[in-house]
Amino acid sequence: MKALYFILSAVTLYAFGYFIYSKYLAERVFRLSDENKTPAEEINDGVDFVPTNKWILLGHHFTSITGAGPIVGPAIAVIWGWLPAFLWVVLGAVFIGAVHDFTALVTSIRHKGKSIGTILGEYAGERARILFLILILALAILVNAVFAYVIAVLFTKFPSSVIPAWLVIPLAVLFGFSVYRLRVNFLLLTAIFLTILYFGIYLGSLYPVDITPVASSLGLSPIMFWIIVLFIYAFFASSLPVWILLQPRDFLNGIQLIILLIFLYAGAIILNPTIVAPAVNPSPEGAPPMFPFLFITIACGALSGFHALVSSGTSSKQLANETDARTVGYLGFLGESSLALIVIIATTAGIALFSADKFTELYSSWSAIKKSSIVAVVEGGANLINGIGIPLEFAKTIIATLIVLFAATTMDTSVRIQRYILNELGEIYSIKPLQNVWFASGIAVFTSMALVLSKEGGKGGMVFWPVFGAANQLLAGLALLVGYLYLRRINRPTLPIVVPMIFVLLITSLAMAMNAWNNFRKGDALLFVTSFIILILEVFLILEAVKAIRKETRAEATHK
């Protein structure tokens, strides 16, 4: 099968999703109207609530949700075959993932920009709210741990990515100051700064930064050194006003991601490589069962509960108009899905352009591809970009750099969300230190770093990847549950939310239970306890929601 058929099929489904299905959701289900004031307009505190141009906000949302997940997950999951991965990424995105993001965003703006956990508390009680906040906190810690390790590994394996990845930070600050304070022409600034960023990628390819001597002098491995540096950076990034770093950095990274996608898809169309992976491979060596583990291995790109944290944590506080939610929430997710799709093409077709046996070598077993997934993406993607005339080594630097930037922007947002939750818990329990921005940021960074360091060499993040995948999807199901409760209360159609909600909760609860059982049998107490606690939290939250629905139903019957 040729890659072009993949692309044409996906584009058709994406077009249906955005132009028809999302319009139905916006107009018929949620009834969006720009006459309704958004939280950003009402509060506008200049720190977290900032009315933002929808394209800049799309850049923030897009890069915040597009981390390492839609890259690593599909790269691993194609070991089960290209067909199930393709179906879950594309159909899952159109009917579940994008619906989830859009629903979380709209539900939050209709509740003054509150987080999904707080909104659940309004419908299912204070106990449900606190349990949900704890679940979100646990997921944010897992996200930070996983992405910090992934970025550190990329800096070590691809030292050419170091200069351009760090160059983005001062440039983003200058960009934000120029746009918001000096009012310099937006398009002109974008062109200038993108030129500088791509020159930085060129410099990185000429002068790769090997941090080994510095790390060794401090008694650290290169990976450990980068993990510590990343968390120090995250501490400050999560506390600054969004317009200083978060918004401009995410916008610039979003533009770069779009350019990268154009390069990759152009290369795939020009070369039109043959898919060398089997359509279905149900029993790879050492792999868990495809059902249900495909649905948690590919999280971001098809569905991700973390996106509900972004939608209700940062994006809902910056939305200038209600109708912008369709562009930011639904289209933003389709953008991430398109990245997951090109990863599938790169790892099943691009990887074999210069070596017919490369796919078989990398995908020989479950353990082999778990170690080599990033390598498969970088090499396969670089082969595709090479098809439009970009030198192979420079193409590898581009891809490695942008994977770092995607993961870093997600990590920035996740630490900020962690800080929001700690602030909220501080208010609930009247704990003044937790209400302080800097103290809460410090706690967020410390707990995430402790998880990374829980395993030798900073591998704590990747050890928890299976738990992250399952917890992530469980959170998505619960976020859909919150959307359902809201629609039910305002007497709007709930079927587009209920069907994906039931599917997600059932399939991922099964995966989490199987994960817990497997870890128990292996004697891995830490993973077993983590999985078990998250599963119990989910059960209690669902029971609280059911209790709330029954209470409302009885009240409605009484009023009649």
Image: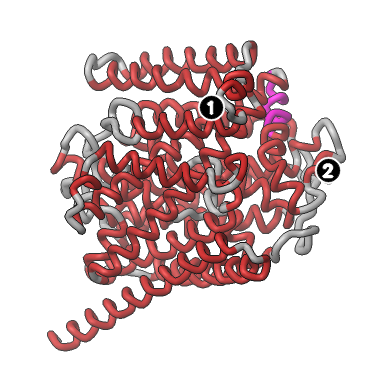
Q: Label 2 amino acid?
A: Glu
Q: Nearer the viewer, residue 248 or 103?
A: 248
In x, y percent, where is residue 239? 30, 34
Q: Nearer the viewer, mark 1 or mark 2?
A: 2
Is 382 positioned to the left or the right of 424 in the image? right
Q: Quadrant of the C terminus?
A: bottom left
Does the image show residue 553? yes
Residue, x 50% and y 48% (percent of image)? 451
Q: Label 1 amino acid?
A: Ile
- Helix, strand or loop under label 2: helix
In x, y percent, where is residue 499? 45, 70
- Measured in 3D between alpha carbons, the distance from the residue under mark 1 to the one under mark 2, in whole angstroms, is 30 Å
In x, y percent, where is residue 93? 51, 53
Q: Which residues are magenta?
A: 381-390
Residue 500 sits above or below residue 366 on the image: below
In x, y percent, where is residue 438? 27, 36
Q: Which residue is mark 2?
A: 361
Residue, x 38% and y 56% (percent of image)? 136
Image quarter for residue 392? top right
Is 24 positioned to the left or the right of 344 in the image? left
Residue, x 28% and y 64% (percent of image)? 129
Alpha-carbon neighbours of circle 2 within 10 Å: few (<14), some, or many (≥20)? few
The numbered mark at residue 259 is 1
